[in-house]
Image: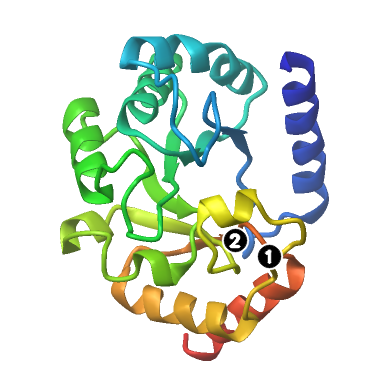
Amino acid sequence: MDRLNKTAVEHMKAMRQAFETDRSRIIISGNIGPRGDGYKPSDMLNVAEAESYHSDQIATFKDAEADLVSAFTMNYLEEALGGVNAARVKEIPVVISFTLETDGRLPDGGTFENAIETLDRTTGNYPLYYMVNCAHPLHFKNKLGSEKTLKRVKGLRANSSTKSHEELDNSVEIDKGDMDLLAREYLDLRNSMPALSVIGGCCGTDHTHIERICESLLAKA
């Protein structure tokens, strides 16, 4: 894993050298994920265990000179906090991205707002920003919390599929969803999330979804 992560960062450095411009800066993120199933938090870590578990991989990205670390599909507070603590020890910026269920809550039942408030309070606002990934906007729209919370949410990598995590787990075919609906929902979310500036896609998406989302956002810029 150490070798592959370092190779990935070197590959991204070459891509940056080839394609970065003054108008389009390229940031290299070392991505990590949860220890277990991103959809089903089980055998959950405490904060110290999570810090220890994620420390080695975060150290690899630090040594490889990634610009930051992004932890995706976090599904409960303690593991996210352990990841932030590990990044702080290694002195590398970190982004935390939570996945949410169809009720807008984390898979362990906690609220998105409480997770962000607790992480910021406990770590002195160490995370650069927060994201939501692997959920359709219809699942969490108007459920993310207060205006203060929304100001800390800068990124979104939504599913095109409106299926629940359980349904996705049991699917035998990719559900590409309604591309136009997804683009409209991104636009609506930008109006309620003033900091939103990092976008992408998750389950069911490909480059055509991202293109449609960008067209929608740029048309209303």
Answer with left or right where residue 141 lies relative to residue 21.
left
Q: Position of residue 8 (x, y in %)?
A: 77, 32
**What crowding class fits label 2: few (fewer than 14 Cα within 10 Å), some (14-19), or many (20 or more)?**
some
Q: Position of residue 79 (x, y in %)?
A: 39, 25
* Residue topped by disc 2: 200
Q: Position of residue 23 (x, y in %)?
A: 62, 65
Q: Position of residue 201 (x, y in %)?
A: 61, 61
- Type of the residue with mark 2: Gly
Image vertical order of residue 35 relative to residue 186, above or below: above
For image coordinates 39% across by 81% down, the residue present is 188
User: Which image quadrant for residue 176?
Assistant: bottom right
For image coordinates 42% across by 24% down, the residue present is 83
Image vertical order of residue 40 relative to residue 198, above or below: above
Give the numbered dot on residue 27.
Answer: none
Mark 2, mark 1: which one is toward the viewer?
1
User: Which image quadrant for residue 85?
Assistant: top left
* Residue topped by disc 1: 205
